[in-house]
Image (cartoon, rainbow, N blue to C red):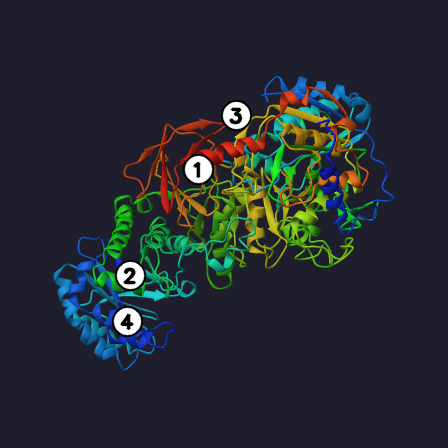
Amino acid sequence: MALSTESIPMRWPAGPLDIARRKNEKGFTADTAEVLGKWLDPATLAVVKGTPVNSLVVSWAEGLPEDAAQQQALKPLIEKGRQAGLDFVGVIEGKADRTAAIAAAKSAGLSAVAMDGDAPASAGIAVIPRNGHTQMRWTANSPVMGVSNGVWPGIPQEMVPTGGPTSLPWVNSNAAVVRIARALAPGKSVWIEFDPPQGAAQPAEAYMLAVADTASFGAGWVISLDDALRADLAANKQPAVDAWKKVTGMVTFFQQNKPAGTYRQTGPLAVVSDFAGPDWFPGEEAVNLLPRVREPYRVIARSRAASASFDGLQAVYYVDQEPPEPLLRQKLIDFAKGGGTLFVPSKWPEPEGSPTEAEPYFLFSLRALGKGRLAVCKADRPNSYDTVEDIQTILSHRNDQLRLYNAPSMNFYCQASAQGEREVIHLLNYSRRPGSDGPLLFVKKPHRRARLVSPELAAPVELQWAPQEAGGAELSLPGIAVYGAVELES
Amino acid sequence: MNRELTRREVLLGAGALMALPALPAWATAPVPQAGRVAVAKCKTYGPELLPALSKIFDQLGGLDRLVKGKTVAVKINLIGVRSQRLGSALMEDTFWTHPHVIGSVVHLMGKAGARRIRVVEGPWSSPETLEEVMLSMNWKPQDILNAAGNVEFENTNYLGRGKKYARLMVPSGGLIYPGYDLNHSYEDCDVFVSCAKLKEHAATGVTLSMKNVYGSTPVTIYGEGAGVDEPSIRPHGGRGGTFHFARRMPSKSAPQQIDMSLPKDAGYRIPRIVAELCTARPVHLAIIDGVKSATGAETNYGSPNRPQAAINPGVLIAGTNCVATDAVAMAVMGFDPMAVRGTAPFVSSDSMQQLGESLGIGWRDPSKNEVAGAPISEVVFSYTAVRDRILAAKKKA
């Protein structure tokens, strides 16, 4: 089986190289080594039998003395796995000799290697570029892009007492990186790697969230299990088997409901950036924080913005310090003149339009421009949260299409079919448990039909519209522990 | 409610006050004036609301006497985390002053000849305009702005349209702070109205017309994100760190705490701050929206002992004195207005009404005030009974 957008990857730590890598880590015990040894046994492949997992990601070379032993030790596992239809991807990192490691991978029957840096010209094997998100090579010739430094999604314990500046809790999510990756490398699969926090067994819901936090945005988490779960799965202990079933059930759910692959992102705001160099941070922070102020948005790569559709947009946030190319600048200005609001950084040269009154605390000074507005940031390095908060206020809640109540630990993400007759609102709960009150979703334009689909439900639930006195209608949703999607049909 | 206090109650009340280390104004505080309070039955926010409000204002002597030709600041209550509602109940049906009440009050004030009406509030932590806050809850702020001539909104969490903060001193010298720096709207008004909700509070037992004034304090000075030396430009954070727990002090530009050894207990601090704020910024008219409300408090999410429930007390209360009005409101809620710390609703706090009385604002004892309109006995809606029923049902389940 060739590596493709259909691949469902899983990290498969096993063998001497993984033992060597882990042995200096805190909490490493003889038990850990035993599990890492045990997962070399082809019998452990039973764990993925009957699940959607079809690609196993193994440690291949790191420039350590154990490299050769690792590659040798993996042979039986690879052989048996390939017979079962599994792909193997070898991770090459550190000071490993790339050329030798690639040759060994090819010879061992691996489907691909994943590595940072440039692939040799004639590798003879698929090479997945694997980098931290700020160093990604989005134009690399590979159907799969690997992001090596995702975050374990959830509400980090150390942030609980303080929460976010909104009073909503702080959440860790991979959504921003994935959405940026999909904008910069459209049509490619994005694999994102992150491990569960070691030292404590994670509940099944934590893994389900890890799947949903990536899959709902159209990426794939390289599934990675904690030591305790792997030990218990190898021993076929029932609680572990049940937890694993829930995790793979979540993966199956997203395989069967692939909206991200075919639906377009929607929202009244577009964030335009090249997300590179100094523009990465403000761009990524905007994309990361806009969900916390409940502002739906689209991400548009600056390189594609001049040809991208601005239909349905009320505002564009042009992030980059470097002014846009003349064609794009003209398009942005025309957009504002036509009634949109264009947010630009402080370095925007010779701002168009004429100054107009605005709240004094705003980070942006407002200028009337045709039928619309140009909002020029007053600060060179504005606070990221204040930026998105002001963008939302300037846009005005008058224009909210959606509002979410009773869901402080949730984010939502909107997509629509090509013709717009069907919309999907993905709801992710980073607390991993339902709130005391079910979420309420306000929809400005009620649709003909609304239903909730979720792997947590035996069957989709038809939702009832509750019309509101001031317009719009609300949908009262049942409690969602991890993930649900509201499907709207017009 | 006109009963005599028992010797024990007198001793407890006096004892509670005696235990308070700082009531320096006792000897010099003015003798409270008798207040006038009016009560009306009003089950809905529909057509019956405007006549009910109009009637209780008439029973207080008429709005025109108070507002004609004047600039009026109406402090409404939009406090709490607005993304968190009580089930599917609307914020205005539980914890916030209802927009129809605000609109009706504005309309009647305009009709009574108010020159300018400024609707003010410092919504929790938010820099957004009041209009935006209202829009985010699907209100129609234009209805309020159009309810009379010359109506405006101001978010008083920060400097707003003012050039500088107004310093309002506590006449008695203060229990916690000697004075407060507030948004100009609280000084630039001839008449100050507290338009509150009939509700409970996790730290102070009840939130009525007095406690509503607490939200007048700008978070640029008193918030957790306030500037250290000078007020911040932009509001950040709630007031809990400064006011509830004294984890930090207000910006140094504002009057500082009179004694740094004062307890850091919200049940001690908040009632005092509220009482002294009500002397620094006296309330000329207290209005309490008790048509719909909730038991528990907006910050009580999931608290097993103080369960929240949307309720319909069906009552409106207004008065010319905030202590007297709150006392009547407490009686309507089924509480003893003379209650002191340790007694419901002041389970873990001092009574801000008692402190207000000690500062000379008004009398708590309804028999010392003039109460018009619907008899309290006919409108009592026991918040405790609702909670008890919920707890009993939970226990049974």
Q: Circle 2 is placed at which residue position? A: A229
- Amino acid found under the numbered disc labelled 3: Glu
> Label 1, label 2: how many angstroms apart (C-alpha)?
37 Å
The chain to which mark 2 is attached is A
Question: In the image, residue A67 lies at what x, y percent?
Answer: 25, 78
Q: Nearer the viewer, residue A140 or B217?
A: B217
Mark 2 or 4, nearer chain start: 4
- Amino acid found under the numbered disc labelled 4: Asp
- Amino acid found under the numbered disc labelled 1: Lys
Q: Nearer the viewer, residue A166 or B310?
A: B310
Q: Circle 4 is placed at which residue position? A: A31
Tag in front: 1 or 2: 1
Label 2 sits on a secondary structure element that is helix
Res. A225 in view: yes
Q: Residues within 10 Å of mark 1 (few under 14, many from 20)?
A: few
- Amino acid found under the numbered disc labelled 2: Leu
Q: Is residue A458 left or right of residue B181?
A: left
Tag in front: 4 or 1: 1
Outermost residue to the left: A83
The chain to which mark 4 is attached is A
- Using the rendered image, report if marks 4 and 1 lie on a common chain: no
Label 3 sits on a secondary structure element that is loop
Mark 2 or 3, nearer chain start: 2
Q: Residues within 10 Å of mark 3 (few under 14, many from 20)?
A: few
Q: Circle 3 is placed at which residue position? A: A469
> Label 2, label 4: how many angstroms apart (C-alpha)?
12 Å
Question: In the image, residue B224 lies at what x, y percent?
Answer: 64, 54
Question: In the image, residue A433 lies at what x, y percent?
Answer: 40, 47
Q: Is residue A205 left or right of residue A318?
A: left
